Structures are given as C-alpha cells and as structure tokens.
C-alpha cells in the first residue's frame, strides 16, 4: 500500500536555525508531491508542490523542497526559521496514474523558540 | 471568493446520536475529499466525491459512516450512532479536478467532533 513517512514527529529549533524535514514515500510510479502547513488553530495550507521539471521547488515564506527520485524523498527546507514558522507540517503524495486520493504523512510539529 | 466552508466548527454529540458535517467547496471546484485527523496520526483519507457520485470510499468505515455530495448544496459526512472513538477533527478539501491533474487541495477549517 502507498505510504508517506515523515521521520520526525517533533522538532524544536531556535530562531535563525536551518530546517530540514524529511519525507519519504513508498509508491514507485509517477507521483505528485506536496507540503502543507497547519498553523495552530487553523486549517491546512499548501506550501509548495512538485509535478515535474526542476526537482528543486520554491514555495511560499522562503520554504523549498527537493525531489530525489532515486531516494523516494521530498524533504522540506528553510535556511533560517522564524518564530512564526511554528506549525505542523504535512508531506503528501498523489499518484497521477489512476489514483485519485492524496495520502498524507503523520505530520511534523515544529516549535521555533524566540 | 470564499474558500472551502465547513460547518459547524465544533460539534458535541452524546454517544448514540448522529453527527452531520457539512462542506461547501470552493467556487468552481467539483471534487470534494474528506479526511479525519487524529492526534499524532496525521490525516487519514476517508472519501472522495464528485457531484452525485462517490468516486473512492476506501477510507470510510464500513458501518455508521456515509457521505454524499448532491447536485445542489454542500457535501455531507454523516456519522450515525457516534462513539467516543469518532472524536476527531474532520477536514474537507476541494479541488478543481482530480486524478491526473491534481493541483493541490484547498482545505476547510475543519469540524472538531467531540463525543461525550
């Protein structure tokens, strides 16, 4: 069965530290990849997405993610985090060959200390 | 241009009652997805609907849960005879189209169901 794994459930960083959140998926076919963010008390918002082309994807608020097909990975990065980045981050995968639903990882809770 | 609207935001039901959760997709979106979020478990897919059709309900429990997306009106997720284990946040998402042209979902604010 298709699955999405996020390696860290909780991450604590100080402001200005660099961030990398891991995401691996199990499906071997062609996929669409997403990162969503959920700020406290709010709904999920799309951070960035990859469908094809340049494997390094730029998103909103200074986030980027790199698709490494050989590693089935789509890690999220930000060079310098801010206190306002405190949120839960979800990696998600959609197959684009017959499957209709998007599968989400369990999420990573990021807490940034001011 | 309203986003995905879910209501109610909070719903409290006693064990054995019915819960009805509503979702109005974004204007122009014809695909609706329901997810359940449990603490430490992320979002679990429940059902994918288009107008008057259930496309994929592989994530729906076999009993007590049902979903519809009528020609007119919002999508409804119905949970009959609720139990404490149904307590969760239920999120609805919509997209302009599904399948090979998935442009990422727009999520609603969710309905937090508490069963007492």
Image (spheres, coloured by chain):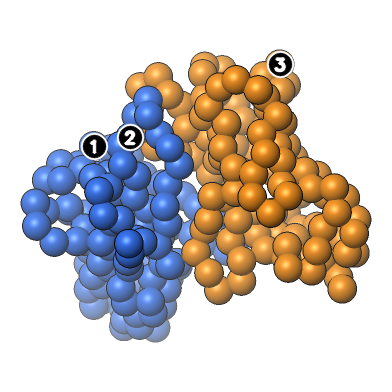
Chain colours: A orange, B blue
- Residue B78, image x and y in percent? 23, 63
The numbered dot on residue B24 is none
Mark 2, residue position: B98
Return the chain for callout 1: B
The numbered dot on residue B55 is 1
Return the chain for callout 2: B
Q: Residues within 10 Å of mark 1 (few under 14, many from 20)?
A: some
In space, the residues marked 3 and 2 are separated at their CA atoms by 26 Å
Q: Residues within 10 Å of mark 2 (few under 14, many from 20)?
A: many
Secondary element type, mark 2: loop
Is A44 situated left or right of B28 in this image?
right
Residue A7 visible, this angle: no
The answer to whether marks 2 and 1 mark residues whose Cβ atoms lie closer than 8 Å is yes
The answer to whether marks 3 and 2 mark residues whose Cβ atoms lie closer than 8 Å is no
Is A21 situated left or right of A57 in this image?
right
Mark 3, residue position: A70
Which quadrant would the N terminus of chain B be assigned to in this image?
Answer: bottom left
- Badge nearest the viewer, 2 or 1: 2
């Amino acid at each position: 069965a298709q699955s999405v794994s996020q390696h860290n459930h909780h991450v604590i960083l100080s402001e200005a530290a660099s961030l990398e959140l891991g995401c691996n998926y199990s499906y071997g076919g062609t996929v669409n990849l997403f990162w969503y963010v959920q700020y406290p008390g709010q709904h999920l918002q799309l951070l960035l997405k990859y469908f094809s082309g340049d494997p390094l994807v730029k998103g909103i608020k200074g986030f980027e993610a790199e698709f490494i097909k050989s590693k089935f990975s789509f890690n999220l990065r930000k060079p310098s985090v801010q206190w306002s980045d405190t949120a839960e981050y979800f990696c998600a995968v959609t197959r684009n060959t017959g499957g209709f639903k998007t599968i989400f990882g369990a999420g990573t809770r990021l807490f940034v200390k001011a | 241009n309203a986003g995905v609207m879910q209501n109610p935001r909070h719903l409290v039901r006693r064990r054995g009652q019915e819960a009805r959760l509503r979702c109005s997709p974004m204007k122009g979106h014809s695909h609706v997805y329901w997810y359940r979020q449990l603490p430490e478990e992320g979002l679990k897919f429940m059902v994918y609907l288009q107008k008057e059709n259930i496309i994929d309900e592989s994530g729906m429990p076999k009993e007590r849960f049902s979903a519809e997306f009528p020609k007119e009106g919002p999508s409804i997720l119905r949970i009959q005879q609720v139990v404490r284990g149904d307590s969760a946040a239920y999120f609805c998402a919509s997209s302009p189209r599904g399948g090979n042209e998935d442009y990422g979902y727009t999520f609603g604010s969710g309905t937090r169901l508490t069963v007492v």
